[in-house]
Image: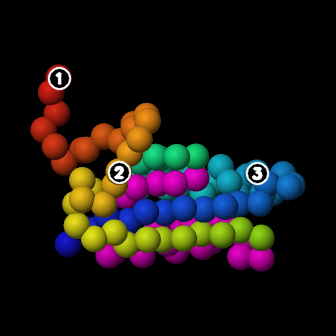
Amino acid sequence: MWMNILITYDVSTSDPAGQKRLRRVAKACEAYGQRVQKSVFECRLTETLLEKLKQRLLKIIDPQTDSLRFYRLPGDREKWVEVYGVDHYVDYDAPMVI
């Protein structure tokens, strides 16, 4: 069963290792969802995919200096997201017109 997950992170970039972690976290999230703000991703995942992503991210972050949050969102995106201003979200489940 698919679910909507919001992932947010704050990675300390005060040193080169933190800058590398930040890039690795973003790259991992990009493989599973869409960036909607600098450190915020919307993902449509199964429980299995969520667990894989979670384990991947937990191997990257430093729990002493970084923060990682997963929010399970109920229902369809249209019901729980209000966007004002630029919205680059693409609904990959909707029909695509070429």
Quarter of the picture containing the N terminus is: bottom left
Q: Which residues are magenta?
A: 39-64
Q: Residue 71 at x, y = what percent?
A: 43, 71
Q: Which residue is mark 2?
A: 82
Q: Residue at x 38, y 45 (%)?
A: 83
Q: Can residue 93 be found in the magenta stretch?
A: no
Q: Amino acid at mark 2?
A: Glu
- What secondary structure is marked by label 3? helix
Q: Residue at x 54, y 62 (%)?
A: 8
- What secondary structure is marked by label 2? loop
- What secondary structure is marked by label 1? loop
Asked if the residue at tag 3 contacts the one at tag 2, i.e. Cβ–Cβ closer than 8 Å, the answer is: no
The answer to whether residue 49 of the structure is visible from this angle is no
Who is closer to the viewer here, 17 or 35? 35
Q: Which residue is mark 1?
A: 98
Q: CA distance from mark 2 to mark 3?
A: 31 Å
* Crowding near the residue tagged with mark 3, few <14, some 14–19, many ≥20 C-alpha atoms within 10 Å: few
Q: CA distance from mark 1 to mark 3?
A: 38 Å
Q: Is residue 5 above or below residue 85?
A: below
Q: Amino acid at mark 3?
A: Gln
Q: Residue 23 at x, y = what percent?
A: 65, 49
Residue farthest toward the right in the current orientation of the protein: 15
Foreground disc of the pair 2, 3? 2
Query: Which of disc 1 and disc 2 is earlier in sequence?
Result: 2
Foreground disc of the pair 2, 1? 2
Q: Residue 24 at x, y = what percent?
A: 63, 54
Asked if the residue at tag 3 contacts the one at tag 1, i.e. Cβ–Cβ closer than 8 Å, the answer is: no
User: Image quadrant of residue 89?
Assistant: top left
Query: Which of disc 3 and disc 1 is earlier in sequence?
Result: 3
Q: Is residue 50 above or below residue 90?
A: below
* Crowding near the residue tagged with mark 2, few <14, some 14–19, many ≥20 C-alpha atoms within 10 Å: few
Q: Which residue is mark 3?
A: 19
